[in-house]
Amino acid sequence: MHEEPVSAWRRVLSHPAVRVAAWAAGVSLLISAVLLLTTDAASSRSWWEHMYQGVGRLKPRQVIASALLPLVSLLLTSACFWHLTRVHGRVRFVEMWHLIAASWVLNLLPLKPGLVGRVVYHSKVNQIKATTSIRVLIEASVCGIAGVAMMSALATLTRYSPVWLESIVVVAWLVMISLGLWGLFRPQKPICRYAAATLLRALDSFTWMLRYAVAFGVLNIDLSMTDAALIAAGAQAAAYVPLIGNGLGIREWVVGALSRWLGEDSASLRVGLAADIFHRLMEFAILLPVGLVGVWWVTRRVRTWNQDQAAGGGESHG
């Protein structure tokens, strides 16, 4: 009885016009965030001067962190997908690294071609069914949400949690670490495999906390671990908004709203927007070249695979 409405809804969401409209909405939100900081001439001058001066105040370790943390995040995300995928087919880690990097760049475009391209690549080159790749994507998303929740719970213990809840969180972490480390070597066991993936995504969430600590530090605002965890959780949640790749435009406003909501002494909406725009610029500067290399690598790999298939008369070498 409910299949027809669900199918119709899926067809609407998958329609190219809807996807392009969603992408345009994300870009519009990003532009509006920039405009909010630049509409008032005096205010905008102070914002950009403040950010420029903040960049000049960065310590060497903060500069290194700004450059390395996006790469560490990409590494952990690649490791999570590789770990979940390797039980279904032969996929090299370097292969998954380039696939995830290429997907990150391509998902900035309308229609999110990076996601579709990765599924097609696995089906063609690794002989992994499209339904299996989609299932892995869902598993990675669920593990990502669990990892963010675990890291947020750990970071907020000292401010909000009673002793009994602290004990539960610590025990949960110990169980996850134990099962996760086992799962890295025994991925065939589902519970251990998912624990390892959750552990990897929790570590990724920690890198996001550090990235936002640096971004707000540019504006001379020291985030507590709790506030950094909440902002990082909101920013990562924005990436799960359907049809808009990498939370483009959504993330900036989520971070801005959280910055204003965290407390009386917290940053204002504009400070949050400015911090995430700086974060986005650093992300582009570091990950765009890596992603473009990934696109080149994947394209070359597919071309080589096609040539091998043609030379072998179409027989699979997988």
Image (tube, grey):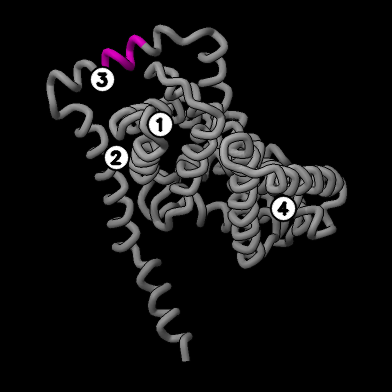
**Farthest-out residue, bottom:** 1
- Name the residue rendered at 50%, 40% in the picture: 230
Asked whether disc 4 touches disc 1, contact meaning CB atoms under 8 Å apart, the reply is: no
Q: Which badge, 1 or 3, is on the more N-terminal residue?
A: 3
- Tell me the distance, in whole angstroms, between the alpha carbons under discs 4 and 1: 28 Å
Q: Which residue is pictured at 32% across the width and 56% down the height?
A: 22
Residue 82 in sight in this render: no
Q: Residue at the location (13% across, 26% down)?
A: 40
Give, as a single range, the part of the protein colored magenta. Answer: 48-53
Which of the 4 image quadrants contains residue 221?
Answer: top left
Give the Cα distance between marks 1 and 2: 10 Å
Front residue of 78 and 255: 255
Q: Mark 1 touching mark 3, by CB under 8 A?
A: no
Query: Can you identify the residue that label 4 sits on?
Result: 84
Look at the numbered disc 4 and give the secondary structure of its residue. helix
Q: Is residue 31 visible?
A: yes
The answer to whether marks 1 and 2 mark residues whose Cβ atoms lie closer than 8 Å is yes
Residue under circle 1? 280
Marks 3/4: CA distance?
A: 43 Å
Q: Which mark is residue 30?
A: 2
Residue 116: x and y, percent? 51, 57
Query: Residue at the location (73% across, 61% down)?
Result: 315
